[in-house]
Image: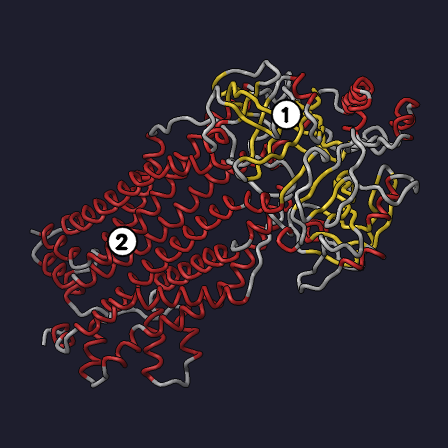
Amino acid sequence: MLQKNVLRALRKKWMQLAAIGIIIILSSLTYTMMFYGISGIEEPTERYLNDYNQEDFSVEMLNTVTQQEAADPEIARFLSEGIFSLSDLKLADPGLFQTLMDRRIEAFRLQNPDASLELREFKMANYTVNGDSHSALMAKDAETINQSFIEQGQKPTGASQIAVNKIYADKNNIGIGDNLSINETDYTVTGFVLFPDYTLPMFDDSFSIDSGLQALMLLPDAAYEKLNYPESFRLAGSIPDAELLDTEIDGTELSFAGQIVTTENMTRSGAIYGELNEGKTMSLGLSIFIAAIAVIIVSIMIFNLLHAERSQIGILKALGYGRLEIAAPYFIAISAFAFLMLTIGYVLGLAAAEPLKNLYLDFYLLPSAAIGQSWIVFATAILVPLLFFSTVSGYIIYRILGDRALTLLSPPVHQSVNRISRAVSRLLSGASGATKFKYLQAIRSTGSFLIFFIGIMFSTLLIFFALMLDGTIDRLTVGYLPEVDYEYEAFLDAAQPPPPIQDGEEKFLAFPFAEHTGENISLYGLSPNNLLYKLYDDSGEDMTASLSDGVVISERLRIKQNIEIGDSLLVEINNEETEFIVRGVVEEFTADKIYVDRETLSLLLTDNRTPDLYNGIYSLAEPSSEDYQTVISKDGIINQSQSMASYSNLIFNVMIAGAAIIAASILFVLTSFTVEKNYYAISLLKVLGYSRREVNSMILSSYFVYALLCFLISIPFALFVLRRLIIVFAQDYGIVLPLIFEPVYALITLGILLFIYFASTYLSRRKIEQIPLQEVLKTYGE
């Protein structure tokens, strides 16, 4: 009989239970989805990276001959002919190039005798498929470090054979045995390949990632050497213990090294470690956070429920029922409800794990395994929070039922004094009684108000982050491209004489091997009066002409190195330092760039022999691929960023939806609890002649004011958290997240929260209308 009475009381609160159930489901779903989704990648990834010997560190080399190396007469001869880059030296004399690389490896091993090193060689190809611009990183097969992994098929052996990564092949309907055409050269696909040092397809400084437009490719060594594409080099290293690695760069012996980076700090190969570890930690933390909110709300609900039933419980105790006998039905009902919601969350999380895993594999180039269930996950997602729920609920039920029967039969006397209410009371010392009642009754329960504040703060943070993501992906991927007027960019072929400059074409000089404060930067030589690549600051002012007496830097470089306009920069170019004055900052986040006058840069690179050196052109019309080594379409690059934009929109929608669900559930439950706790007060107000609108205002409208105050307090907290996020990404991964806050975002967030508030309190207002005047008489049995 007692069990039926408890179930009857809970059925009357089905809407509150549904709102609480959503929060509990979110807790279990979040952990299960993230853990299973990540585990489906983590285990096969660990085996793959170990078996194929992923590098422990990388020596990012200057792609030029150093001053010490130039002392060799053979190398000096090539320098006198204008050959200063490693790729040009390799084309001119492969034997001398290999000797130079052996010397660099030996110099590094003298400083790190426990390290093993191997030269990593790769070329970048840009080509068009069905009108879309594609890019490929073609790596030379490694011997011991970063060995190529063939997922399916076999390694290419013939000159016209090639292996590509599987996700690229799947997205372009390419199967083993199919033909793949790259710049009018046909290859037969023999297998699907992965490279351990490219778990993320980041082929340059930009954050443009589209696994359907960016490919990893493997060719036989002989076919690789015949490719006429820009080539880059670095040293891949392995070491038994990371603590044995000396990352200090000697000024003379290791002057060829731009930087020594361990794998975990390298975005292209190490970001996956942080992603997996942080993903699991975040999922557990978020799950605990959401579960804690649910536990507190359930506790408040139990407290209200037992106080509403105190008269009946008092009668049962007077009839001789024991505390445990009365508590058991409540405990069982709440535990069963929590178990059901947690189980639903687990099932939904298990179903969502596979799409989450596939979403990871859209970014990361990794093997995957089928998702299998684990008792540990089941226990963590269901049994652990259930034990938490049951323990807290049982304690509250047992504690409340400790009152004597006579106390339970008396009308409840609510304690309304806490630190918050004391502070508010002092602020309202001169206000009317109605105003005091209005603003004090909403904060009588410290726990309820704490949950209310946390809900508003968490929702504000999520909505702010979602809004600030708008445009971030574009700024990271295509950067400054929408602001410039050229349509194509083409690079000269060093083995051929440059073609004549046509109308609608302008020269530029790219030198990506400079160094500032120990970090590699790119110099871009432009004419101060060029028309196709104008430089604008954040206010839209044209700064291009300022190149005549200074330089313009990218916003990314300014943030990373804390550079201000007017500062003097010492930039190392071909082992010699040159001073530049910063005249402006361009809103570009794709790379660490310094824009400089092309003639000035030309004189620096040629020891004052010529002011007309250039290695590429900007053009309005598409240049001939026969005249240039590489032709890149601006629209093609912009199109490559579209898939990243779609992921950004997905994250935006998920964050907004999550914030709305959590905030709406909390607000609805708390306002409905407020109405229930004030049944007597509401009835009394009606008896005293207060209108429906006045009663609504006194019972619920105070939440509106508190919501505004909580929102205002949450703004600086949210901005602080997001600023810290930018710093972490910049310091740990070298990625500057261009999260830009606009004042309108605060108005949008406020609008969303107010909509949630009014929608959540609508049903509670309806409840107030249904409370009869006789409630005050029934409460005292009159």
Q: Which residue is mark 2?
A: 396
Question: Position of 459 compared to 589: left or right?
Answer: left
Whether residue 86 appears in this view of the structure is yes
Note whether 719 is above or below 376 in the view shown: below
- Tell me whether circle 1 and circle 2 mark residues in contact (CB < 8 Å): no
User: Is disc 2 surrounded by few (<14), some (14 to 19) or many (20+) residues within 10 Å?
Assistant: some
Q: Which mark is first along the chain, 2 or 1?
A: 1
The secondary structure type at the circle numbered 2 is helix
486, 379: nearer the viewer: 486
Residue 84: x percent and y percent?
A: 84, 32
Q: Amino acid at mark 1?
A: Ala
Note whether 411 is above or below 605 in the view shown: below
Q: Quadrant of the C terminus?
A: bottom left
Q: Which residue is mark 1?
A: 139
Note whether 391 is above or below 693 in the view shown: above
Whether residue 107 appears in this view of the structure is no
Residue beneath the point at 52% across and 60% down: 717
Residue 739: x percent and y percent?
A: 57, 55
Q: In which image quadrant can residue 30 be found?
A: top left
Of badges 1 and 2, nearer the viewer stands 1
Residue 645: x percent and y percent?
A: 50, 48
Residue 661: x percent and y percent?
A: 35, 55
Note whether 466 is above or below 445 in the view shown: above
Total marks shown come to: 2
Question: Position of 445 compared to 769: left or right?
Answer: right
Q: Amino acid at mark 2?
A: Ile
Q: In which image quadrant can residue 439 be found?
A: bottom left
641, 48: nearer the viewer: 641
